Amino acid sequence: SAVISQKPSRDICQRGTSLTIQCQVDSQVTMMFWYRQQPGQSLTLIATANQGSEATYESGFVIDKFPISRPNLTFSTLTVSNMSPEDSSIYLCSVDGWGYEQYFGPGTRLTVT
Amino acid sequence: DQQVKQNSPSLSVQEGRISILNCDYTNSMFDYFLWYKKYPAEGPTFLISISSIKDKNEDGRFTVFLNKSAKHLSLHIVPSQPGDSAVYFCAASARSGGGADGLTFGKGTHLIIQP
């Protein structure tokens, strides 16, 4: 399985600011995914990022709020824009495996005050 | 609405006994199911999966059973060990065109293995 790292591991931000989360994979992958886990909730898919094309967003998530970059096959960023306390969550990136499983990074714990 | 449901937020099992974690789904388009294990401050770790064309898949101490007619799957851990204490997530995918798709997760079950 791929080794996935995320930066930062955690952050505390003020409302109205933006935070960019980085996801680095140790091998080239086709698809990268971004998820959010709000407190006490399940993981929810935000968007799918395919290198060389625009990210595909799930219902309820928009590019202006969560812009995503995918400049190459090993790296992606997710920006949480104009943050509010409701954005306090764990943000996780994942990559597709050999089958249909996905492998996850350690997550970024974001607290918005 | 929750398409993948794990109705037990927590489960306590004695060490050495069988742990059974349950998951129900509502979307008939789901055709691939996965279980993940998550420790605090870590990302989910893939455990085992099953395709909808099968009703059982086994990997060491872990076995997943799928009942398509009931839209129900379960994860059996035998024997349970202290290191199995974690949150377990059930996830499902509706594969399209053979490509990778995002996963739909349940809320998780916190498994506690008692010594």
Image (spheres, coloured by chain):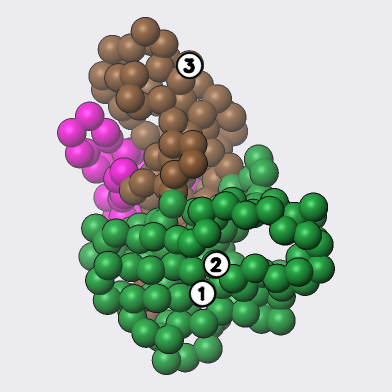
Chain colours: A green, B brown
Q: Name the residue tied to disc 1.
A: A77
Q: Name the residue tied to disc 3.
A: B12
Secondary structure of residue under mark 3 = strand
- Percent across and percent down for residue B19 are 37, 22
Q: Nearer the viewer, residue B62 or B43?
A: B43
Marks 2 and 1 share the same chain: yes
Q: What residue type is labelled 3?
A: Ser
At 36% across and 46% down in the image, what residue appears? B45
Marks 1 and 3 share the same chain: no
Q: Which of B22 and A74 is in front in this view?
A: A74
Please indicate whether residue B87 sits to the left or right of residue B8 in the image: left
Secondary structure of residue under mark 1 = strand
Q: Disc 2 versus disc 1: distance between alpha carbons?
A: 5 Å
Q: Name the residue tied to disc 2.
A: A21
Please indicate whether residue B51 sits to the left or right of residue A20 in the image: left
User: Which of the numbered marks, if any, corresponds to residue A5?
Assistant: none
Could you tell me which chain the residue with mark 3 belongs to?
Answer: B
Q: Nearer the viewer, residue B43 or A102?
A: B43
- Percent across and percent down for residue A73 are 33, 81
**Label 3 with label 2: CB-CB less than 8 Å:** no
Q: Which amino acid does label 2 sit on?
A: Ile
Stretch in magenta: B47-71
B67 versus A31 height, above or below: above
A72 versus B27 height, above or below: below
